[in-house]
Image (spheres, rainbow, N blue to C red):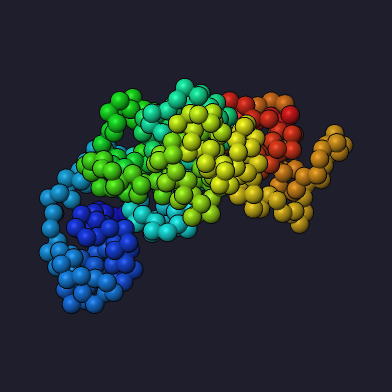
Amino acid sequence: MTSTELQAWLMLRSINGVGSVRLRQLVEAFGSPQAVLEASLEQISRLPRMDRKTAQAIIAKHNPDSVKRQIEQMAAQDIQLITYRCDTYPKPLHKIYDPPALLFVRGTLTAEDEVAIGVVGPRAASVYGKTVTQHLTTELVQHGLTIISGMARGIDRVAHESALNAGGRTLAILGCGVDVVYPPDNADLVPRIIENGALISELPLGTQPTAMNFPMRNRIISGMSLGVLVPEARIKSGALITADYAIEQGKDVFAVPGPIHSATSQGSNRLIKNGAKLVETVQDILEGLNPYLLPSANAATTSPPSATASEKHLPPLTGSELEVYQALSETPLHIDRLAKTVAKPTHHVLGTLLALELKGVVKALPGKQFVRA
């Protein structure tokens, strides 16, 4: 992205009345953010549902100094701007209602992050909820999944921290600017998440957390995830908003049952009653995610590799599964090297590995390494 394009995107986003929906409408109508800023009041006013006040604000091109400061800060803190037109924009977000037009990213997004699960729960979490979250998150990371959460206190913090401690990747979707640390007591997580994932927000730099920002960010948590795990939740927990978004987006919701007299489990128990997948072990989650992970691996290839004599005892495998299995041995192999060996994208290989684990022929080890079972 050129500096002119960056300035134009930020200029439009800084105008009152121009949110994600309006920003996409403007750019699609005129072809680029620069063209929007060069349009006349009459041209902008002709757009559907465009009020004159917003049109006049666009023409006025206010806040040039503010935009300049944002650009300087982005350079200083290594913050990227990803627009909905960028190749690096998370593909799953294109499929949700009201996808964010812009994402501010502090850290890195990789192809591995397409194989991700959202983990959400209450800020005032119980010991039971924290223990369950740590256990399940650690195992999910060992199976190659990226953990997505909201960097709040309680369950969110445990999810991020457990993923990092297990050597995995984690993405924090914020209800404030990526330059704002909230809550302050999670400041120690910030550099670790940037190093092993990313802080992500659709909100401009400097935006402080407000109550209305968090439901908005929840749609991004579920939108970037294959499914959402709720280890525990109160009856009015914000985690249930994320679960609702997941259902609207066609994603699976997984919930851990808790004591019937525990206030922190009433919401998650109700999710199960209403159709969420009950989770007792990580296998329940992997089996639920399997159809979404393996659209190609579940179909036989035209010319699958032939099995060796020592592999005749294996359960039925697709061509992709056999190819990955044959690349493994009793010596641990990292996912990146395995992907290079079979010449396939990492996220595709992760999906195939999950299928092989479910069939009992491959075992995941810490550090995203895999061996034959």
Q: Position of residue 19 (x, y in %)?
A: 28, 58
One can see residue 240 in this view: yes
Instruction: Say how many tags the image has.
Output: 0
Q: Position of residue 361 (x, y in %)?
A: 75, 34
Q: Residue at x 33, y 27 (%)?
A: 186
Up/down of 131 relative to 40, above or below: above
Residue 213 percent location from the top left of the image: 30, 46
Say whether residue 341 is left or right of residue 155: right
What residue is drawn where x is 23% and y is 43%?
A: 207
Answer with left or right where residue 6 lies relative to residue 131: left
Residue at 25% over, 47% down? 204
Residue 72 on image: x %, y %: 20, 43
Quarter holding the N terminus? Answer: bottom left
Q: Pick the residue in front: 145 or 97.
A: 97
Q: Is residue 7 visible in the rendered structure shown here?
A: no
Residue at point 36%, 38% (across, down): 199
Q: Quadrant of residue 77?
A: top left
Q: Nearer the viewer, residue 94 or 167?
A: 94
Front one among 306 and 359:
359
Q: Quadrant of residue 355?
A: top right
Using residue 238 as the reference point, say whether residue 316 is left or right of it.
right
| Residue 51 higher or lower than 169, as above or below | below
Locate the C terminus by quadrant: top right
